[in-house]
């Protein structure tokens, strides 16, 4: 097991955002974390990466107990992430955004930097300040920057938000490629089922901070609890104004 | 005057090099000490204008007017040093009338040493200055530790049934602290019990402290500070319904603003001084100190206090030294060196009284010719109430109640 | 043209960089019109310029017959336009309830405000549970609900919605689109920017396709949803 | 590249000019320039922290004061100037590192005011400590060599500028510092030990003011709390850096020169009235009103129009 | 015992003075997010103008407060757009540049006051000056009590206005995001002007009161800037409740240190305290600051 989370619980004041959460992630797969808005997905990410200290529970990464360790320490161990609300270094260029987090500098690092920029199709923006990039490019840059620290586990928080279906497909391919090229494991939060279904080997479903289902994507899709709480009836339920006329 | 310095109003038209003595005036025209800075400037200007009116300083058989060059030290020692450097090297002043504050004096004095330009301060009164033994720096006001003992003496020894207990408050600046130390030392020497002694940082609210002192019920509340703090102490005490038998303060009480702003509340407050406008002393330049007061009053609207007067006298002392020296402007380096010797030996009777400078010891180059005075505000005016042989009015003790004035 | 929104030759620039190069379109009363386009095409920029958040460089914007080009946004709002901006723009230091009430700032009809409040809280039960929570601590999706709810509270006749479904769980995406239909049926007008082009076209009357700051294709929704270019570029191929 | 060479030649010429300066100007103006150069070093140090890392300190005057006092106290104990100065520098930086650790956890205005509170605390402490002379201050034996102080200040301030250039503009360290400025949480999540970096920058930005304070004390020969620990020192660092252009290397240099020399020139012209304050205040307000990105934006902007504006250009210049 | 009660009362009343200076200041920060360096100069100008009007018309300063408020309200209302221009023109460091701008303004005000009114000390006399209410050996200075009441009234009005009124809600919304507030129909430019004007108006009034309690001179601003900053920050920037708590705490501390520890250490302890408060409570005493 690359990561195992045991009995993770977190309170914000009186509000229990995550409740006795258990999850294991095998090395080399893409695991999905889905659930309704406010279910506690992002909070879970924050706990794993050390941005919040859990009220109780344990997080074991590659055999190390990283619970409550400072964020930079956890990143150093090999967990990188992206943010639901982008957190790029706005006034740094694309290139600098990558370079700044690389922990070794030098020829190899420079080559790695080039490679990431190419892979993520950021060549033409390389010298732009990141805040001046179109949204989609900013999303890609965030992933590239996370990869620059050479993580073993990559946590992606809604990377496809605000993308149209074609862009979602492109991003899905990119992520598929990453997992091959970089020898890493991915934990993905995403509401776009199109992407989740295309990528994930396994899904964990969260509601009210608790796991309500876990298993292969296909099984989850048919889980009535998940359908009711999260998936809905798919586009079918939309009445379609146009057809009514 | 390449830098656009303005001349004193009555300098006349003598601008040619060698026609006038160029005098540098260094003082605080902005920043925290702007009040006293302006008072000193008034003192210096009164001297210059009067000298020029009378035709100038007499050297040999010729008279030379004085031309004033001003520089603002921004109440900051570094700016003060810049200012002296400027006046000496650019304006080529022959001598300098010194700063208002002791801090600026300490930073400016080394520059005067460097260029061998004499400086007399008419205001700085921290004893620390004189301990440095600057060759070119002199001062007309006796250091505070020399003057602050007089009113304590009066209050304790001269008044029948005098003060037995005293609370001392002071602001933590060089001048005010020295005042408090001197009050304390004198009081203790005379067997007075000091029930409270507190040196507070500038800007403190005195009310809580006075509340505490009120509980101790001392005969005298003595304060080291400036006009602003003195006013605040009186206002605070009154609003607490607190009235000791006497308030004792130092500089600032003699300041016209003190009485003007406090009105009857200023009554009976004691202070220390070296001079008041009540004195009648003969003077070469103004004929008498009374005439000086008149001149000053028509010029500035207020009565001069001992600081302004000390500054005017600083100018007079330079004048006397120049007459004695007999050197024509511009002064050469050797002239200026010789001037120091003249100043060291000089003994002039000015409107301030006998003025002479110590040649050695801890008061090196400070005016030790003068004695201190105990003063008290009576009927809205500054009256001399001690020491015994000098008093012009009887001391009032204890002070009348706030509402019986 | 009487009612609705009409934009002619709109140009908008950020500093010296022009992002929208002369765009014209209209939205008639009671219509749902969608604006689709790739990331960075200029959709949000157009909405911002229309609602007065950023200045117009050239062109005219007419709302219900009144020219409102470069009016300050608070005045435009007064004419009955609401805008759910990209990135939600909720007031993080106000509570959920206060956010909704700010939406009704310009309204005086106290009774109807209360009615609308009940309506919105009914639409999003999550918000009802969290009425007193500071909006900044809501999850991403919860904030999105709040942003839409707040726009509904303005009681505006014409709504500009910038990616209202972003970050919402699939089940909520459905409700958002259904809400749009309800609103339109109530006679209000909607200009909808959506990445989820398939759904947007499903509920819209007409649409415009924006490519790098200019309109490339436009037509009624049915036409667009079958247009090969649109299919390829925005609908993820034949899906 | 040729542009770079030109800049290098320009820099070299400027350097030579600076070295020759004492030969050509009067001792008064040399004094003034010495003061201006001191402020360049001070403003630049503040810029390291505020401009590059985004932490606005209102307490940097304290480090100047600490440097001055430590130097004075050690010299009073008989140490030679250089020895005292080196020790003062170390003490100041160490002190900053210690105080930085907790203080740098604060954000924005809270950090600003915490540093200011701590600086005021130092001033009050000096007033009551037994070995600082309290309100009386301390006087040192005068060493009246204007050239010595000119070159000393030049050396220290040039070092501050060079460190800013090489460490903050050119090295990855500077990128990391700027990353903290932009997104502190993201920096942490991506493996930067932000606390360690912040403390280093804080200590470095205190080091130069510490040294400059020591040189100042020896130069002016008299220090007291009102002169070396007044809040005005930090205020001026802030205003100089902002006036010139925050987060740029030229900004604090230009800002310090303009404000200090401007003050002195107005003061020379209107020195006997307080009117110069009116002009000074007006000048500051007007410059900021019309050049909101500082005086250096005047030059970069010209460049932009000269070369025509492409998207890239704008980014490079402002980045 | 008497001393203890007197010390508490003195502390509370000093707190009242601090709150008067800070109430407008914290509102201004909360909405505009600008630290106005000239806060002390507004105090000073308020004091001088009151002095001048009061001495020439012989009207009691307390009666002049409404007039002073209106005068300075207008001044602030007219100045704010210029400040706003600095804020909106700058992209990356708007608030810092605004701070530097107000620094320039403060130098200008100080210089102008010195040039026009000179260096003299002034004393403002009110109907309450020098009076006190005595109860069981405790003295309550009337002027300070009046100031305390003034402070409490304005802060309560502020709180009520911000928390309970529609317009207050709009102010709080605009404080956070002016562009989005605009979409809600809120004219944030107008709000900015009004808030700044309220701030200058109130601060000037506090100057009149302070001038009456202490004394008036052109340098007085610095002293009060310090207290305004202290209260506003310790209370949490922009938090009015916080300012009340911090003002009272600061006043009590001041009074108790003076009496029981020694006036010598009053500021040393106060600043140490402020520093520690910030470390322990990074968003102010009530944790409600920006
Ligand atoms: N700082 C906080 N204080 C109080 N409540 C919080 C805080 N942060 C998050 N919450 C609450 O915790 C719950 C979980 O939030 P979280 O951001 O983890 O949701 P999420 O699953 O990521 O949702 P989404 O899909 O909408 O992003 C939400 O109900 C949210 O309102
Ligand atoms: N504040 C800004 N400053 C400078 N350029 C900007 C700014 N906002 C957007 N742009 C640029 O303007 C262009 C249009 O951006 P806009 O946000 O309108 O696109 P969009 O169609 O809404 O894209 P998305 O789908 O990502 O929301 C882009 O090239 C973008 O980089
Ligand atoms: C009253 C003081 C500030 C001035 C005083 N004469 C001095 O020695 O500094
Ligand atoms: Mg989330
Ligand atoms: Mg957009």
Image (cartoon, coloured by chain):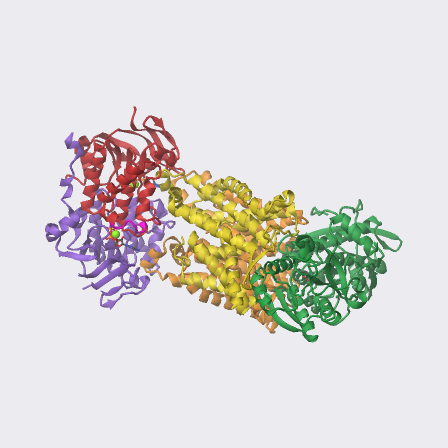
In the foreground, B377 or D314: B377
Q: Nearer the viewer, residue E56 or D163?
A: E56
The percent coordinates of residue B78 (x first, y second) are 63, 58
Q: Residue furthest right?
A: B61
- Residue B74, image x, y percentages: 63, 54
Task: Based on the picture, tell me whether residue D147 belongs to the magenta stretch.
Answer: no
Q: Give the colour of chain A.
A: purple
- What is the drawing colour of chain D? orange
Q: Which chain is green?
A: B
Instruction: Count the numbered circles shown.
Output: 0
Image coordinates of residue C52 in percent, x first then y, are: 37, 35
Vertical placement of residue C63 versus B12, above or below? above
The red-tinted chain is C
The N terminus of chain C lies in which quarter of the figure? top left
At a point 35% along the width and 44% down the height, the residue shown is A132
The secondary structure that most of the magenta stretch takes on is loop
* Quarter of image, res B378: bottom right
Residue C130 is covered by the magenta coloring: yes
Q: Residue furthest top?
A: C1
Image-quadrant location for residue A53: bottom left
Span highlighted in magenta in the image? C129-135
Chain letter, colour yellow: E
Furthest residue in direction front, as rendered: E136
Residue C134 versus residue C51 in the image, above or below: below
Q: Is residue B134 visible?
A: yes
Q: Is residue A204 left or right of residue A100?
A: left
Residue at 69% x, 47% y: name it.
Answer: B3
């Amino acid at each position: 097991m690359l990561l195992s989370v045991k009995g993770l619980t977190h309170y914000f004041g009186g509000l229990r955002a995550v409740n006795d959460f258990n999850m294991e992630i095998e090395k080399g797969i893409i695991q999905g974390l889905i659930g309704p808005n406010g279910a506690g997905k992002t909070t879970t990410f924050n706990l794993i990466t050390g941005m919040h200290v859990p009220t109780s529970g344990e997080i074991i990464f590659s055999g190390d107990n990283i619970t409550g360790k400072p964020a930079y320490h956890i990143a150093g161990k090999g967990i990188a992430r992206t943010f639901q609300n982008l957190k790029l270094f706005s006034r740094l260029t694309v290139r600098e955004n990558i370079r700044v987090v690389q922990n070794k500098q030098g020829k190899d690092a420079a080559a790695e930097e080039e490679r990431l920029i190419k892979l993520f199709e950021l060549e033409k923006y390389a010298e732009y300040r990141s805040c001046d990039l179109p949204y989609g490019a900013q999303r890609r840059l965030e992933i590239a920057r996370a990869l620059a620290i050479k993580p073993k586990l990559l946590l992606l928080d809604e990377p496809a938000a605000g993308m149209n279906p074609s862009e979602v497909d492109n991003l899905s391919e990119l992520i598929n490629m990453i997992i091959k090229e970089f020898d890493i494991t991915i934990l993905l939060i995403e509401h776009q089922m199109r992407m989740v279904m295309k990528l994930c080997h396994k899904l964990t479903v969260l509601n009210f901070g608790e796991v309500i289902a876990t298993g292969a994507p296909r099984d989850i899709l048919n889980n009535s609890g998940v359908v009711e709480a999260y998936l809905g009836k798919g586009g079918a339920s939309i009445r379609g104004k146009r057809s009514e006329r | 005057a390449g830098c656009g310095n303005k001349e004193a109003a009555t300098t006349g038209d003598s601008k040619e090099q060698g026609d006038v003595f160029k005098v540098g005036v260094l003082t605080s025209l902005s920043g925290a000490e702007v009040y006293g800075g302006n008072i000193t400037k008034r003192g210096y200007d009164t001297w210059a204008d009067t000298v020029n009116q009378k035709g100038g300083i007499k050297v040999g058989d010729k008279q030379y007017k004085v031309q004033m060059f001003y520089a603002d030290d921004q109440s900051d020692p570094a700016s003060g040093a810049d200012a002296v450097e400027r006046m000496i090297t650019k304006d080529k002043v022959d001598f300098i009338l010194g700063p208002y504050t002791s801090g600026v004096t300490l930073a400016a004095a080394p520059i005067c040493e460097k260029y061998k330009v004499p400086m007399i301060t008419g205001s700085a009164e921290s004893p620390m200055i004189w301990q440095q033994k600057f060759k070119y720096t002199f001062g007309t006001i006796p250091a505070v530790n020399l003057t602050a003992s007089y009113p304590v003496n009066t209050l304790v020894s001269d008044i029948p049934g005098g003060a037995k207990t005293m609370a001392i408050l002071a602001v933590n600046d060089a001048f005010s602290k020295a005042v408090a130390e001197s009050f304390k030392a004198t009081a203790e020497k005379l067997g007075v019990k000091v029930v409270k002694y507190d040196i507070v940082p500038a800007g403190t609210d005195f009310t809580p402290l006075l509340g505490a002192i009120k509980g101790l019920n001392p005969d005298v509340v003595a304060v080291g500070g400036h006009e602003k703090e003195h006013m605040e102490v009186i206002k605070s005490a009154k609003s607490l319904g607190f009235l000791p038998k006497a308030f004792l303060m130092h500089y600032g009480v003699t300041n016209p603003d003190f009485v003007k702003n406090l009105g009857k509340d200023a009554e009976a407050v004691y202070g220390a001084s070296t001079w008041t406008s009540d004195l009648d002393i003969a003077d070469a330049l103004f004929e008498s100190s009374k005439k000086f007061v008149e001149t000053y009053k028509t010029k500035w609207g207020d009565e001069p206090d001992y600081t302004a007067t000390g500054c005017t006298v600083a100018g007079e002392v330079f004048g006397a030294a120049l007459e004695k020296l007999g050197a024509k402007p511009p002064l050469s380096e050797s002239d200026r060196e010789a001037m120091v010797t003249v100043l060291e030996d000089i003994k002039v009777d000015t409107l301030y009284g006998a003025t002479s400078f110590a040649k050695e010891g801890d008061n090196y180059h400070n005016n030790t010719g003068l004695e201190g005075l105990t003063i008290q505000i009576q009927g809205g005016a500054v009256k001399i109430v001690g020491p015994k042989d000098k008093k012009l009015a009887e001391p009032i003790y204890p002070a009348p109640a706030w509402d019986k004035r | 043209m009487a009612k609705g929104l009409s934009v002619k030759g709109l140009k908008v620039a950020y500093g010296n960089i022009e992002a929208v190069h002369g765009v014209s379109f209209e939205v008639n009363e009671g219509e749902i019109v969608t604006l689709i386009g790739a990331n960075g095409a200029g959709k949000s920029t157009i909405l911002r310029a229309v609602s007065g958040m950023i200045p117009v460089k050239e062109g005219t914007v007419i709302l219900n017959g009144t020219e409102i080009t470069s009016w300050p946004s608070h005045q435009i709002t007064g004419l009955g336009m609401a805008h759910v901006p990209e990135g939600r723009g909720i007031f993080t230091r106000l509570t959920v309830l206060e956010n909704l009430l700010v939406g009704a700032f310009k309204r005086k009809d106290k009774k109807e405000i209360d009615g609308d409040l009940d309506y919105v809280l009914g639409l999003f039960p999550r918000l009802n549970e969290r009425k007193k929570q500071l909006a900044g601590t809501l999850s991403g999706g919860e904030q999105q609900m709040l942003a839409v709810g707040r726009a509904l509270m303005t009681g505006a006749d014409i709504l500009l919605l910038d990616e209202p479904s972003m970050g919402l769980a699939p089940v909520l995406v459905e409700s958002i689109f259904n809400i749009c239909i309800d609103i339109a049926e109530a006679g209000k007008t909607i200009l909808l920017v959506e990445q989820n082009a398939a759904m947007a076209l499903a509920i819209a009357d007409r649409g415009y396709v924006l490519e790098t700051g200019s309109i490339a294709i436009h037509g009624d929704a049915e036409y667009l949803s079958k247009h090969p270019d649109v299919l390829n570029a925005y609908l993820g191929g034949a899906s | 590249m040729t542009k770079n060479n030109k800049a290098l030649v320009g820099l070299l010429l400027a350097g030579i000019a600076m070295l020759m300066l004492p030969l050509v100007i009067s001792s008064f103006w040399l004094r003034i320039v010495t003061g201006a150069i001191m402020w360049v070093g001070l403003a630049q140090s503040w810029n390291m922290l505020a401009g590059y890392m985004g932490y606005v300190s209102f307490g940097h005057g304290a480090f100047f004061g600490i440097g001055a006092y430590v130097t004075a106290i050690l010299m009073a104990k008989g140490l030679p100037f250089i020895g005292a100065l080196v020790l003062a520098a170390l003490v100041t930086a160490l002190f900053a590192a210690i105080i930085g650790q907790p203080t740098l956890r604060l954000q924005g205005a809270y950090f600003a005011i915490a540093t200011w509170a701590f600086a005021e605390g130092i001033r009050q402490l000096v007033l009551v400590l037994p070995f600082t002379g309290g309100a009386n201050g301390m006087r040192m034996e005068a060493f009246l060599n204007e050239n010595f102080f000119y070159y000393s200040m030049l050396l220290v301030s040039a070092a501050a500028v060079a460190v800013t250039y090489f460490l903050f503009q050119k090295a990855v360290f500077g990128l990391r510092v700027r990353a903290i400025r932009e997104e502190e949480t993201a920096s942490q999540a991506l493996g930067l030990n932000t606390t360690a970096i912040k403390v280093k920058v804080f200590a470095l930005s205190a080091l130069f003011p510490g040294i400059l304070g020591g040189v100042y004390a020896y130069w002016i020969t008299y220090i007291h709390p009102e002169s070396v620990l007044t809040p005005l020192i930090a205020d001026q660092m802030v205003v100089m850096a902002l006036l010139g252009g925050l987060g740029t290397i030229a900004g604090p240099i230009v800002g310090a020169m303009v404000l200090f020399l401007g003050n002195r020139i107005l003061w020379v012209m209107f020195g006997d009235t307080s009117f110069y304050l009116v002009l000074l205040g007006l000048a500051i307000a007007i410059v900021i009103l019309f050049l909101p990105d500082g005086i250096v934006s005047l030059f970069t902007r010209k460049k932009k129009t000269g070369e025509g504006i492409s998207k890239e250009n704008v980014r490079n210049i402002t980045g | 015992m008497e001393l203890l009660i007197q010390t508490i009362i003195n502390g509370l009343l000093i707190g009242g003075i601090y709150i008067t200076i800070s109430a407008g200041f914290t509102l201004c920060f909360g909405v505009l997010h600008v630290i106005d360096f000239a806060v002390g100069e507004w105090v000073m100008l308020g004091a001088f103008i009151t002095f001048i009007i009061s001495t020439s018309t012989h009207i009691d300063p307390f009666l002049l407060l409404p007039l002073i408020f209106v005068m300075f309200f207008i001044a602030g209302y007219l100045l704010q757009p210029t400040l706003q221009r600095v804020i909106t023109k700058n992209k990356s460091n708007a608030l810092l540049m605004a701070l530097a701008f107000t620094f320039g303004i403060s130098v200008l005000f100080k210089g102008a006051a010195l040039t026009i009114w000179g260096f003299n000390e002034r004393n403002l006399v009110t109907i309450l000056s020098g009076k006190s209410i005595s109860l069981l050996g405790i003295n309550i200075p009337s002027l300070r009590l009046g100031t305390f009441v003034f402070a409490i009234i304005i802060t309560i009005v502020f709180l009520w206005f911000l928390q309970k009124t529609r317009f207050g809600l709009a102010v709080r919304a605009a404080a956070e995001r002016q562009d989005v507030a605009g979409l809600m129909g809120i004219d944030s430019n107008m709000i900015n002007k009004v808030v700044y004007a309220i701030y200058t108006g109130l601060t000037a009034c506090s100057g009149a009161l302070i001038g009456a309690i202490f004394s008036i001179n052109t340098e007085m601003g610095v002293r009060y800037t310090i207290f305004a900053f202290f209260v506003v920050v310790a209370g949490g920037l922009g938090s009015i409740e916080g300012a009340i708590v911090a003002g009272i705490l600061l006043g009590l501390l001041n009074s108790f240190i003076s009496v029981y520890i020694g006036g010598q250490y009053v500021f040393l302890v106060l600043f140490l305290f402020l520093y520690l408060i910030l470390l322990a409570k990074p968003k102010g005493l009530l944790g409600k600051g920006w």
